[in-house]
C-alpha cells in the first residue's frame, strides 16, 4: 500500500485510513468463538510520524495492532520494546502505551478495536485451556501481567498483508455482498493474527505462565459474587472453587495475591456495600437491609458494618 493512499480518519484525526474506509469505521460485528462472543468495533490505519512519539494513551476497548511498515519503540507500563515490520501487539483495554517511530520511515499500523463478552468467561474451563484454542490464546494475551508485542515470521506477515490487500480491493470494488465480504475478511484477520502469535518466538513460555489464568480466575470470582452474593442458600467457597476448577485453599491464595482479600472478605464487603446502598435509599430499616443483602443475623451484620465503614447502620439511616 502506498502512503499517499491513506486519508485522515473522520473519527480520529490523528489516524490515517485507506480512502473509502470511512464507511466501515463504525462497524459492530459479533462473532462466536467457542462459547464467547468477539465484537469488532472499528478498523483503522495509523501512520506514525518519523521520530515523533505518540502521546501516552489507553483505550476503553481492546486493540489488535499489526505493524505493516517501519520500525520504532513501543513503551508499555514503563517497559520499552523494539518494533519492526511484522510486530503484532494485543493491547488490553486500559493498558497505557505509546510509540515512537525510527528516523528512516514512519511506521504504519493496522488496528482493530474489539471486545469480548465478559459473561462468556463463565463457561470457560480455566483449568484446561489448550494452546490450540483461539479464545485461550486471546485471553492469555489480554490478561498477561505485562503485555508485550510478538514478532511474526515472514510467512505469517505475507498472509496478513495479503488479507489486508484483499480488504482494500473489496472496498474499492463494492460489488454485491460487499459488507459480508468485509466482515469475513476482518474475522480472518483476527484468526490469522492469533494463529501467527501462537507460532511466534516466546509465546509458548508466555502461555505456560500461570499469571493470566489466575487473573481470569479472580475476575470470575468477582463476577460470581456480583451475581450471586445475595442468594439463598448462601454462596460458599467450596462451590466457587469447584466452578473455577481449583481447590478452596488455592483459590484463596490466588485472590489474596490479586486483591489482598480472601473469598469471604470479598463476599462480605460486597454484601455490606449492598446493604449500605439499601439504607441510603431510606425505605427499609436495618434488619430489612441486612436480610436483603444476604445476612441471616442482624447483630452480626451490625458489627461487621461498623468494623468495615467506621459507623453503624443506624447512623446511615439518620443521615
Image (cartoon, helix red, strand yellow):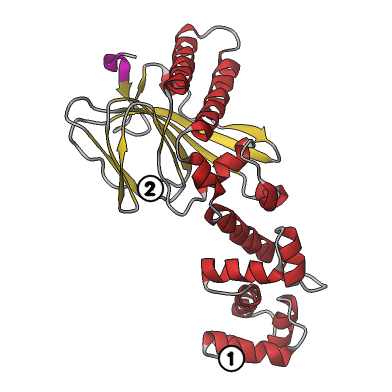
Q: Which residue is mark 1?
A: 312
Q: Residue at x 63, y 74 (%)?
A: 274
Check the image and report above or below for 259 versus 314. Answer: above
Q: Is residue 181 above or below residue 237?
A: above
- Write down the region rendered in magenta: 2-6
Q: Quadrant of residue 176?
A: top right
Most prominent secondary structure in the magenta stretch?
helix
Q: Looking at the picture, does residue 196 appear above or below residue 175?
A: below
Q: Which x, y percent locates residue 269?
A: 60, 76
Q: Residue 141: in sight, yes or no?
A: no
Residue with the mark numbered 2: 58
Question: From the viewer's perspective, is 52 left or right of 256?
Answer: left
Q: Which mark's residue is nearer the viewer, 2 or 1?
A: 2
Q: Is residue 18 left or right of residue 272?
A: left
Pointer 2 or 1: first along the chain = 2
Residue 189 visible from this viewpoint: yes
Amino acid at each position: 500500500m502506498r502512503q499517499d493512499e491513506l486519508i485522515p480518519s473522520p473519527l480520529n484525526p490523528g489516524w490515517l485510513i485507506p480512502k473509502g474506509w470511512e464507511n466501515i469505521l463504525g462497524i459492530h460485528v459479533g462473532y462466536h468463538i467457542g462459547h464467547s462472543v468477539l465484537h469488532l468495533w472499528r478498523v483503522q490505519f495509523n501512520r506514525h510520524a518519523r521520530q515523533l512519539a505518540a502521546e501516552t494513551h489507553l483505550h476503553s476497548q481492546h486493540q489488535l495492532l499489526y505493524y505493516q511498515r517501519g520500525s520504532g519503540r513501543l513503551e508499555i507500563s514503563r517497559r520499552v520494546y523494539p518494533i519492526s515490520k511484522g510486530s503484532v501487539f494485543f493491547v488490553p483495554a486500559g493498558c497505557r502505551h505509546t510509540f515512537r517511530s525510527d528516523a528512516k520511515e514512519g511506521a504504519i499500523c493496522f488496528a482493530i478495536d474489539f471486545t469480548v463478552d465478559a459473561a462468556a468467561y463463565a463457561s470457560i474451563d480455566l483449568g484446561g485451556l489448550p494452546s490450540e484454542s483461539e479464545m485461550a490464546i486471546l485471553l492469555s494475551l489480554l490478561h498477561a501481567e505485562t503485555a508485550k508485542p510478538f514478532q511474526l515470521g515472514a510467512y505469517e506477515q505475507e498472509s496478513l498483508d495479503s488479507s489486508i490487500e484483499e480488504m482494500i480491493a473489496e472496498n474499492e470494488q463494492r460489488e454485491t455482498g460487499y459488507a459480508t465480504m468485509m466482515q469475513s475478511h476482518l474475522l480472518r484477520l483476527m484468526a490469522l493474527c492469533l494463529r501467527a502469535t501462537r507460532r511466534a518466538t516466546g509465546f509458548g513460555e508466555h502461555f505456560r505462565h500461570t499469571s493470566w489464568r489466575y487473573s481470569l480466575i479472580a475476575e470470575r470470582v468477582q463476577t460470581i459474587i456480583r451475581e450471586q452474593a445475595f442468594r439463598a442458600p448462601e454462596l460458599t467457597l467450596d462451590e466457587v472453587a469447584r466452578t473455577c476448577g481449583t481447590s478452596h485453599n488455592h483459590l484463596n491464595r490466588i485472590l489474596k495475591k490479586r486483591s489482598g482479600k480472601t473469598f469471604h472478605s470479598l463476599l462480605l464487603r460486597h454484601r455490606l456495600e449492598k446493604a449500605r446502598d439499601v439504607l441510603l435509599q431510606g425505605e427499609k430499616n436495618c434488619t430489612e437491609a441486612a436480610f436483603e443483602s444476604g445476612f441471616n443475623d442482624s447483630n452480626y451484620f451490625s458489627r461487621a458494618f461498623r468494623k468495615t465503614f467506621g459507623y453503624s447502620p443506624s447512623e446511615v439511616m439518620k443521615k
